């Protein structure tokens, strides 16, 4: 049922269509994105449209926690997200500062916070699948903390790193659904080791290894596994095996 159109100082409320969300707990979709300058050419094309959400404000109202979400879209209507977002007293309108926003309320406390998080993730994923757009990949990315460990050098200046003193790391950064599969992005970094070795050993479907425009030095691996617990188990088994083989072949240890 569409809500009535409300005129306020913030702007005109757009028609809202309530849609039940099937999720009540945490969901798989998250962003651990990073801002970074474009690197070398040859980056994979991610389509011509992008969608994203940005959390803006929170306050208490009528005994509930109310939140404001900014809806960002390039190449697709931004108001389409509204029907997928849950909550109480949902209002979708044009804000004078943020543009397209969704205001929605949940019960106070941890339970309400968890439901909000689940609905956010469900709504974003449903919106992405409906439009065929990926989230704006660099929008919410923070630079990766670079906690460098001291790498001990050999006595021979020409020897470089001694066996076991080089560093490799593989970190899962993003997870989303694509073509009825769970797809993950793994960021690879290395000091004194070949990045492509992990790419070679990592198993999964539609594997792509490349330099990502949003990430710092290193490679990323995009790879798909089956949906559900069985696919998750297979992914982590493959991930650990690839990391172990990477360390074995390079005589490196893991670190960041």
Image (cartoon, rainbow, N blue to C red):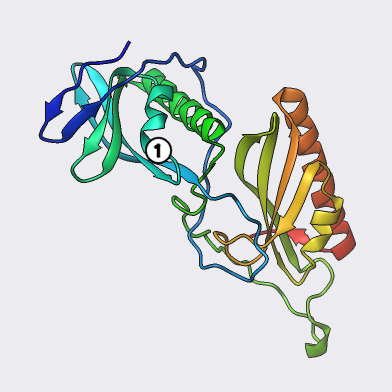
Query: Could you say where residue 110 lies in the image, as x and y percent from the top left?
Result: 39, 22
Q: Position of residue 238 (x, y in %)?
A: 82, 41
Q: Quadrant of residue 176?
A: top right
Q: Which corner quadrant holds the C terminus?
A: bottom right
In the picture provided, is 202 more to the left or to the right than 24? right
**Residue 119 visible from this viewpoint:** yes
Question: In the image, what residue occupies the spot 62% across and 67% down?
Answer: 217
**Left or right, 91 with reference to 233:** left
Is 7 placed above or below 142 here?
Answer: above
Q: Which residue is mark 1?
A: 77
Residue at figure coordinates x 66%, y 57% from the top left: 44
Q: Nearer the viewer, residue 209 or 75?
A: 75
Task: Give residue 28's quadrant in the image.
Answer: top right
Question: What residue is shown at x 58% (from left), y 49% (from top)?
Answer: 47
Q: Secondary structure at mark 1?
A: loop
- Relative horizontal placement of residue 66, taking residue 75 as reference (left or right): left
> Does residue 68 appear in this view?
no
Q: Is residue 147 above or below residue 204?
A: below
Residue 133 x/y as whole percent: 54, 41
Residue under the point 36% across and 33% down:
79
For label 1, the crowd category at 10 Å Cα-Cα, with few meaning under 14, some 14 to 19 and many 20 or more, is few
Give the camera-side residue of 103 and 236: 103
The outermost residue toward the left is 9
Above or below: residue 207 compared with residue 144:
above
């Amino acid at each position: 049922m569409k809500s009535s159109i409300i005129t306020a100082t913030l702007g005109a409320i757009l028609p809202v269509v309530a849609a039940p969300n099937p999720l009540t707990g945490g969901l798989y979709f998250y962003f651990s994105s990073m801002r970074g300058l474009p690197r070398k050419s040859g980056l994979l094309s991610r389509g011509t449209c992008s969608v994203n959400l940005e959390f803006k404000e929170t306050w208490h109202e009528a005994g509930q926690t109310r939140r404001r979400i900014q809806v960002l879209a390039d190449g697709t209507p931004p108001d389409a997200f509204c029907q997928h977002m849950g909550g109480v007293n949902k209002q979708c309108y044009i804000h004078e500062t943020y543009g397209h926003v969704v205001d929605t309320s949940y019960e106070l406390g941890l339970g309400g916070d968890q439901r909000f998080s689940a609905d956010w993730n469900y709504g974003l994923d449903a919106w992405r699948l409906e439009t065929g757009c990926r989230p704006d990949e660099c929008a919410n990315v923070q630079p990766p903390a670079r906690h460098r460990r001291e790498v001990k050098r050999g006595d021979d200046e020409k020897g470089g790193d001694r066996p076991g003193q080089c560093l490799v790391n593989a970190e899962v950064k993003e997870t989303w659904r694509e073509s009825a599969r769970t797809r993950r992005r793994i960021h690879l970094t290395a000091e004194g080791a070949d990045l492509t070795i992990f790419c070679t050993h990592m198993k999964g479907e539609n594997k792509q290894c490349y330099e990502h425009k949003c990430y710092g030095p290193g490679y990323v691996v995009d790879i798909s596994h089956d949906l559900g617990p069985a696919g998750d188990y297979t992914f982590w088994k493959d991930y650990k095996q690839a990391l172990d083989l990477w360390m074995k072949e390079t005589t490196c240890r893991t670190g960041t």
